[in-house]
Amino acid sequence: MTEAAAVAVALPAVARARRRRVSFRAVFGITVLLAMGGSALLAPRLAPWDPARQMLLKRLRPPAWEARGLREHPLGTDHLGRDILSRILYGGRISLLVGLSAMALAAGLGVTLGLCAGFFGGRTDAIIMRIVDVFLAIPYILLAMGVVFALGPSLLNVILVMGATRWVQFARIVRADVLSIREREFVTGARARGNRSGRLLLRHVLPNALTPIIVVATLELAFMIIYESALSFLGLGVQPPTPTWGWMLADGRNYIATAWWLATFPGLAIMLTVLAVNLLGDWLRDTLDPRLKI
Amino acid sequence: MRRGFRLIVPLLTLVGVLAVVGPAARDAARAAGERDVTIAQGIDAEFLDVQMTNNIVTLIINGSIYDTLLTRDKQLQITPRLATAYKLVSEKVWEVKLRSGVKFHNGEPFDASAVKFSFERIYRPDFKSPQKGWFSTIDRVEVVDPTTVRFHTKVPDPAMPARMTLMYQLAPKYVAQVGDVQANLKPVGTGPFKFVEWSKNERIVVEANDEHWTGKPAVRRATWRPIPELGARIAALQTGQADLIVNVPPDQLPTLAATKTVRIEKIPSCRIIYFGIAQIKGGALADRRVRQAINHAVDVQGILDAVLLGNGKRINSSMPPNVWGYDPSIPLYDYNPQKAKELLAAAGQTNLTLTLQAPNGRWAMDKDIAQAIAGQLTENGIKTNVKIIGEWGSYVRSVLDHKTEDIFMNGWCLPSLEPDHWVTPNLHTGEPVSQYSNPEVDKLIVAARAEMNVEKRKQLYAQLLRLIRDDAPWIFGYQQMDIYGVNTRLKWTPRGDESIRLTEIGF
Amino acid sequence: MLAFLARRLLQSGLVLLGVSVIVFGLLHLTGDPTRLLLPLEAREEDVRQLRTLLGLDDPLWLQYVRFLSRAVRGDFGLSFKHQVPALGLILSTLPATLQLTVAGLSLALIVAVPVGILAALRRNSLLDAVCSVGVLMGQAMPVYWLGLLLILVFAVWLGWFPAAGRDGLRSFVLPACALGAFSMARIARLARSGMLEVLAQDYVRTARSAGVRAFVVTYKYALKNAAIPLVTVIGLEFGILLGGAVITETIFAWPGVGRLAVDAIFSRDYPLVQAIVAVLATLFVLINLAVDLVYTYLDPRIVYVRSAR
């Protein structure tokens, strides 16, 4: 926080502009996320149809505002006659659930390892960093494919795999931050007072490393949503009939030229959510610690 | 130091650009001629050593380079190719006369020793050929003279002519000289086209063999391209990058209808799609009434119309009309939910819950049809869950290991078009793809397999098929419609055995 | 300096060892590939024979040691599916992927760096917002969606570029766009933040107030310094791009390693998958090693910073 304030003081014009304007990015990001999250939570209330219900006689109907559209299917129907709007709402639940869980898993793993590496240093650090390097070297998608393939695609496996391949991002950033924090006075002071390592980590070091964690968490959430859709494209994502945005997009991709609504709506859902999260992450980084090099 | 940096960046960029531009410029395809054809399929050929494969796409590509002893014409009747005549000398001996004056692409002459060599190569212990099962009834090949061979079979085998349509001929001296690996990378056959180049996952190029005894092919040069993504494959056809594409799903027809340079060709395929019921699991599934009820509870025609837009024809038993032995008089199961309920009640199974498994993307709209069927069964009193197994390898494994769910979707077509291959592997007790056991059916299968009298054999098959229909080991699905997209400058109509013959393409 | 180099080499070696363990262990979680290699009618003895032939019955650690000792000599065995040496197969398809990755990265750099710098110069203005959002949209779209839309618009409707395959210079454009779009956001962001940081420093502010000419001179200096972090990023982005290449190559029917990998994983082609991951990981390690060396050559002070990385 101090660095940012220093910059603000040094460049008066910029500082004034900053204080005056509410960041568009933050507003956009938070609004979209609330909308997505809200509709996902309220899906059972909002969705007009059962997302798995096939109405074969009404397949491939365009959105309601088009000529062949039907009022009861505002966003149209897919190739099995399922209502797109309902599937988007319910799909959001799964996609966001997968994204958040995977991100949480990655964060949990990565932060823990990063803290240990940064704080304990020495051999622990060397070992953990080598493991990080190993995971960085292997293309994450091939690793994910291999594992999902081996264990079979299911909601749990997908989350596990996604988390297990992306923890590295958290580990590196946390470690870097911890390295600089641990030499600061309050830590050495606490140590001198006889605090044990574990307590030290949790009570003094972690709260100060929170900033980069939050930034990375938002960015990784965005990544996870795209990642899930990539796995669906390869046929290794969460399996039907559970709708997810990724699966809907993958399914609808052959209809881009004819029944454009099958792919466009889930695609837009993904895009808006990812965009919002990314912008939010950007804003957080700029506000909390602009020097963060991610 | 900084100055060094100034130089490095542009230097790296230059290297990078050159790395990109150089090879790309060199690889630019030679301009396609008027009589050149590009065919886009979903996957690349696995091998160009035709004996190493049983995969239909690979066989199609290899079929332009290699010839078989006999072949099937457009109407799927067996006709001569490298063999001009054949006759039964005794119950277990077939004498085959070979065409004379035929040469392999490298100049080596084709004769009886090539036939013997080709057959024996498949059964070499160290040779990993999936074709070992195709000719397992043949005991040995006897060379009588350079244009005559005799096949000695272990048991009377009326399917010999069908097997001969799958006997691809390799050049003995060439293979012995260059070894198996090179024979795969630089194939030599007697076919109407000669091998030019193979760039893995990119293209296979063959050019016309003007010395072929069938005459100069109309196509001068053909390129086989693997384009796995359907959208890209269709786009390639629309932009003219490809002249012929395969496996167009019915839903894409409107896209192509709008393109003036493209026309659609359809033909009922030899491939049938059915839903096997794992009767050997016992319980409810072992009761014939339950299986019949399942058949009555599904409106196959309705689903075909809705999902495949009518591009599929219901099958009445386990064979499609393309296969000899088919009996058109066997009735289809009518869609009758009421009757289904009655049958279930009679069997005491009013609360049945089943699981249906299907692959994803193996056959046109497969998972969608599976979901539609499961949905319909559920509506009609049989709660059915769907399990989609996206990965084909696991799917095959579950079928072969007999570890599938209660109902499993399967597609079936063998290039031999031999009737026994449509009943033994899928319905005989203990066979790899069969999760069904019925001693009566087994007896008929074995009898029909060995019956040398054509009339009697046909009757046996009719009887067998009717029995199968009544015992309902499957949900009888449909015969697929093979849909191709063709550029209007080509004169070509499809074949009912899923094959594409370059010699059948005109302009 | 030499000590640093030695240490980095040792680290790289350990990393590769770790990669080999993971790859080996991972693949033994999968099922049995023998069923896929044999025809439908295969008997149990055939299956067992094949397992022995391929050495799948030996204890795991023995298989690993065997694998490792051969791998260091470049022998990854024969690909089950293609029946040719795995390494040779990969090396023959690698150029295609490298070409695509270089094209994608170049495109990303060409577009994103100026955008990032521009955004930094006009910080918090509308231009900044538009640039951020524009570049972020590329990262927010799943690659295959973008790819298919590009094909639809630029190949089918406009006919400017071929729809698929690798056929000359024009066929690079669409796949490179699809592939590079994802990296553009990250690169632009880095360029922007790097530029911002440099701009905030004293010498720049002084130059700014000292007059235009002085400013221009220091501005170029600032630019170069802002570019240094980008060099590191290139190494990392390469790894990410290789991952994205898997999907891009499938869509555009590009004959590269990505497609080979997808195919190999789905057909349980053990030797080929192992070889692919090993080659790609080695490539990644080598590239990052090279990047580190370039870095230290440019600025030896970094040695201290990076060894504390």
Image: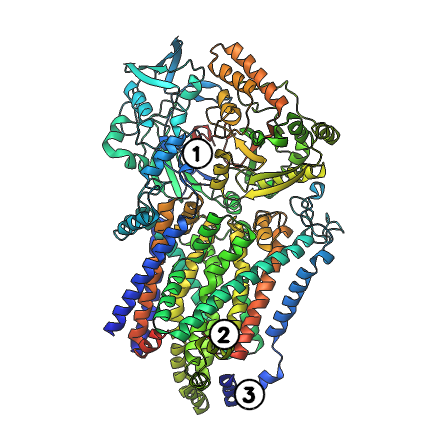
Q: Residues within 10 Å of mark 1 (few under 14, many from 20)?
A: some
Q: Is residue C119 at least partly visible in the picture?
A: no
Picture residue at 62% right of the left edge, 23% below the top: B471
Q: What residue is pinned by disc 1?
A: B55
Instruction: Report the side of B244 relative to C12 (left or right).
Output: right
Picture coordinates of residue B363, whole percent (x, y): 54, 37
Q: Is residue C1 above or below residue A20?
A: above
Residue A212, numbered label: 2
Picture coordinates of residue A95, whole percent (x, y): 59, 57
- Describe the element under mark 3 as helix, strand or loop: helix
Q: Identify the chain of the residue marked 2, using the numbered disc in the image.
A: A
Viewer-proximal residue among C191 and B197: C191
| Between marks 2 and 3 in the image, the one whose residue lies nearer the viewer | 2
Q: Amino acid at mark 1?
A: Asn
Picture coordinates of residue B483, whole percent (x, y): 55, 35
Q: Identify the chain of the residue marked 1, using the numbered disc in the image.
A: B
Instruction: Report the side of A75 relative to C27 (left or right).
Output: right
| Between marks 1 and 2 in the image, the one whose residue lies nearer the viewer | 2
Residue found at the very far top of the displayed protein: B90
Viewer-proximal residue among A257 and A175: A175
Picture coordinates of residue C38, whole percent (x, y): 40, 34
Q: Amino acid at mark 2?
A: Pro
- Describe the element under mark 2 as helix, strand or loop: helix
The answer to whether the residue labelled 3 contacts the one labelled 1, judged by CB atoms less than 8 Å apart, is no
- Describe the element under mark 1 as helix, strand or loop: loop
Q: CA distance from mark 1 to mark 2?
A: 53 Å
Viewer-proximal residue among B464 and B93: B464
Residue A13, numbered label: 3
Q: How many marks?
A: 3
Q: Identify the chain of the residue marked 3, using the numbered disc in the image.
A: A
